[in-house]
Amino acid sequence: MADIGSGLLAPEPVLPGEPDAATALASGAALVTASGDKLLGGPQAGLLLGRAALITALRRHPLARALRVDKLTLAALEATLRGPATPTATALHEPVERLRDRAGRLAADLARAGLDARATGSDAVVGGGGAPGVRLPSAAVSLPATLAASLRKNKPAVAGRVEDGRLLLDLRTVDPADDATLLAAVLAVTGDQARRGRSRLPAGRCRPRRSSPPCWTSTNTSGPGPVLRIRCAAPFATSTVSPRRTSISWPSRVTAPSPRTTNQCSARRECRW
């Protein structure tokens, strides 16, 4: 009896060291146990392969009724064996050159949108109980690690891995048809973060030399960066804004009429950081 575990039914050139059912049976095993998922890529189930007399005896055992799978699982397993290549098989055999080309196009699209994105080489692993320690050459889109949590919480969720302070989105497990969805998800998350960042801009304070009406602020999203507009009725002195704690000396009086007050003067400056 042999337990191959991973569900690989025949030898796989990409995974030469992974045991498979056909080789185990040819080597003399009377019974082979395997998984219906993992490398086979089907539903979660257990498989028994071997001599007909043994399989018949096991099928008639009283425990078989308690351990048998339902019809939906059987239908999914049949579709896995008879249908087109599974996502697992497709990911294993995706040429690395095609992955690099996709990563380059995605990174270029994100960079044009103003993101710190670049294509990079990557090592993919099979995982899921199959081919432990085997690494496959791959390609990924490298992004700032600060995006990892937001992408996981996004809809659709995007799960990457963080290496050396960068978030890697390995494309070996991404269907080429989903590249546009992945691009839209990253852009949506970075847009949300930018909006939240603008909502946390400092309000700014005016320190009047004598009694004056209060200040008000507004933000403007146009231009290369966030803009904080500080307006104060004259007279006033100096205002300090963060995060760079830029000190701005305002004139003591401005003659331009305020758009929000009557018979008063205001000052208006833009601060970028």
Image (tube, grey):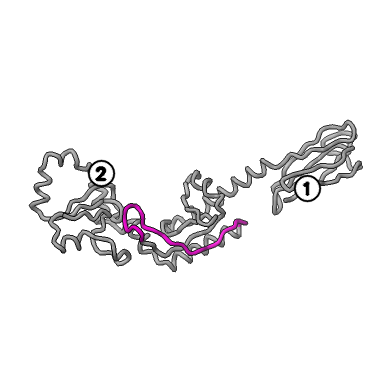
Q: Residue at 54% across / 61% down in the picture?
A: 107
- Quarter of the image for the N terminus: give it: bottom left
**Type of the residue with mark 1:** Thr
Residue 252, quarter of the rendered image: top right
Q: Is residue 88 above or below residue 254?
A: below
**In this orientation, which residue lies closer to the viewer: 34 or 141?**
34
Q: Is residue 60 magenta?
A: no
Q: Which mark is residue 246?
A: 1
- For label 2, the residue is 72
- Counting residues from the start of the chain, the first of labels 2 and 1 encountered is 2
Q: How many marks?
A: 2
- In the image, taking residue 93 as reference, residue 204 lies left or right, namely right
Identified at 88% across, 31% down, the residue is 211
Q: Position of residue 187 (x, y in %)?
A: 56, 51
Instruction: For the residues labelled 2 and 1, say whether their Cβ atoms are less than 8 Å apart.
Output: no
Label 1 crowd bin: few (<14), some (14–19), many (20+), radius 10 Å: few
Above-or-below relation of 262 to 8: above
Give the residue type that dot 2 points to. Answer: Leu
Residue 96, disc: none
The spot of residue 138 in percent (x, y) is 43, 63
Which residue is depicted at the point 79% across and 41% down?
Answer: 230
Q: Which residues are magenta?
A: 113-133
Please provide percent x and percent y for residue 205: 79, 38
Horizontally, residue 166 falls left or right of residue 218, namely: left
Type of secondary structure dominating the magenta stretch: strand
Q: Residue furthest bottom?
A: 97
User: Could you tell me which secondary element the residue under label 1 belongs to?
Assistant: strand
